[in-house]
Image (cartoon, grey):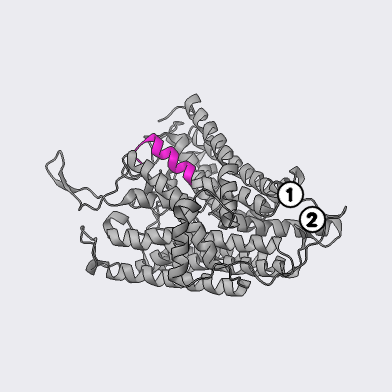
Amino acid sequence: MEEPVSSREFGQLIFFLVLLIGLTPFIGGWMARVFKGERHFLQVPLGWMEKLIYRLGGVDPTEEMSWWQYAKIVLAFNLIGFLALLGLQLTQAWLPLNPAGQSNVELGLAVNTAASFVTNTNWQAYSGENTMSYLTQMMGLGVQNFFSAATGIVVLLALIRGLTRKTSTTVGNFWADLVRTSVYVLLPLCFILALALASQGVVQTFSAYPTATTLEGASQQIPLGPAASQIAIKQIGTNGGGFFGQNSAHPFENPTPLSNFLELLAILLLPAAIVYTYGVMVGDRRQGWSIYWAMFVIFIAGLGVALWAEYQPNPAMDSLNWMEGKEVRFGTMNSVLWACATTVTSNGSVNAMHDSLSPLAGGVAMFNLLLGECVFGGIGTGLYTMLLFVIITVFLAGLMVGRTPEYLGKKIEAFEVKMSMIAVIAPSACVLIFSALACYLTAGRAALGNNGPHGLSEILYAFASMSNNNGSAFGGLSANTTYYLWAGSVAMLIGRFAVIIPVLAIAGSLAAKKITPPSPGTFPTTGPLFVVLLISVVLIVGVLTFFPALSLGPLIEHLLMQTGHTF
């Protein structure tokens, strides 16, 4: 049992939020220089690597691509990554760096894992220390952690160019965007974080699993591995795939309060900073800050509800507040903050079990997923998803004032609105359709850990996580079953690429248009009015789509809990 939030926990929360906001313009401004190809301080130590990659790949970084060429390369690059990761899992027993003697991964699980890491979902239907060799963890999962994060960023860069260029047929060069993102942003930040985590006790070794003798005299294997390097990119890249099955609830992944704070900060750092990057790149920082504050308000509102729910006495537990399922080393506040941070981004890592959260707190985490990961979201993916909502918001505002809607001087017409709606509807349809099938099929219900509304929440959360490329799990669902492996694979692929393709199509359409100077009738897309309207559109779309499902899950469970019922 834990007392209500202490002044120490409240002070840590405020410090965390202030530090996040304070770092945003510094990190965001630096990324803008990197993405625009301007001079920056990392060109001296790392410029040779960028040039070497271009030379080895035969790439001309100045060669521009149309949106369709860009899209085809995105798809081909990710297909190759999928096949490489799949092959690595299916043959790991015969490959080196397998001191624990892990067997080859079963086909369904291998396909699910390959789809998961290529799409930046990092949903794990397995326990890493019992399933994956060191080579698979590093060359397969770790590499895809970099490339899937970079893919989200490069798609955003193409969209930004579509918004800022006039009468252009191109949206940039995929290879140049990918290399600059990986070499100058992800690699150095992950190197620094990996050293910091290793200093706190996160394991980083190629040694075989040692055997310990327990107090009862039994033998127990202690899993090890090169974890610190993968934990760094899982957090920085908003991936979330843990080296060990318990993710950041495992002491070898997250051993101290400082490691917990650094990993928490890393979850939100780049997704928040890239919104400022957007403002710099479009030539108006106010545009970036308006979107930033819309995201921040939704995040803080959800966090407030979740904290309130967790610190309320539980009638089903004799009106006590229990720590079951929480991170007892760091307290309830850190468990709830992590749950909210990991679900507003596409990170998906956990330091506590979401299945053990109160119904409302678990509902907040679920609702964050169901909003489409647009509140900060993955690096790049969250912002381009929010820009889809911006397009819808501007379109609705244009209808209200009776003129053609515009955004950054570009007319928003039927094509952009249709593509935006496809990108918003596709993941939502996957959530509802696959959840309904899971409730109907015996194979879907057999994997449940609980019955009643909590069981529905487990199913709904699983497909909300996979379809929106988050990867966190409620914890009570047995996901390593045939239905969830194959249905989840389809949901993850649709949730990723049914959004990317429309976003790139919008980028190409906008790039071909001329820029219209603002007039007295132009709806302003900065300031409090626009922020409120954008928040309203995001919440209304989410509520209208998912309220029936949420009402049958976490909402009714909360009401029943007040009468002492549990499930």
Q: Is tag 2's residue or tag 1's residue first in the polypeptide sequence?
A: 2
* Residue neighbourhood size for the residue with mark 1, other residues' Cα within 10 Å, grouped as few (<14), some (14–19), many (≥20): some
Q: Amino acid at mark 2?
A: Ala
Magenta part of the chain: 254-266
Label 2 close to label 1 by CB (< 8 Å): yes
Residue on which disc 2 sits: 397
Disc 2, SS: helix
* Residue neighbourhood size for the residue with mark 2, other residues' Cα within 10 Å, grouped as few (<14), some (14–19), many (≥20): many
Asked if residue 263 is among those painted magenta in the image, a careful observer would answer: yes
Image coordinates for residue 210, horizontal then vertical, percent: 18, 49
Q: Amino acid at mark 1?
A: Leu
Q: Is residue 182 left or right of residue 504?
A: left
**Residue sitting at 65 percent across and 70 percent down?**
170
Image coordinates for residue 148, horizontal then vertical, percent: 47, 61
Image coordinates for residue 521, horizontal then vertical, percent: 87, 54
Between 441 and 35, the one nearer to me in the picture:
35
Between 456 and 467, the one nearer to me in the picture:
467
Q: Is residue 444 left or right of residue 282?
A: left
Q: Is residue 505 visible?
A: yes
The residues tagged by marks 2 and 1 sit, at their Cα atoms, a distance apart of: 9 Å
Q: Is residue 312 visible?
A: no
**Residue sitting at 65 percent across and 43 percent down?**
293
Asked if residue 130 is among those painted magenta in the image, a careful observer would answer: no
Residue on which disc 1 sits: 533
Residue furthest left as drawn: 217
Instruction: Assign the magenta stretch its main secondary structure.
Output: helix
Disc 1, SS: helix
Q: Which quadrant of the figure contains the N terminus?
A: top left
Image coordinates for residue 106, horizontal then vertical, percent: 30, 69
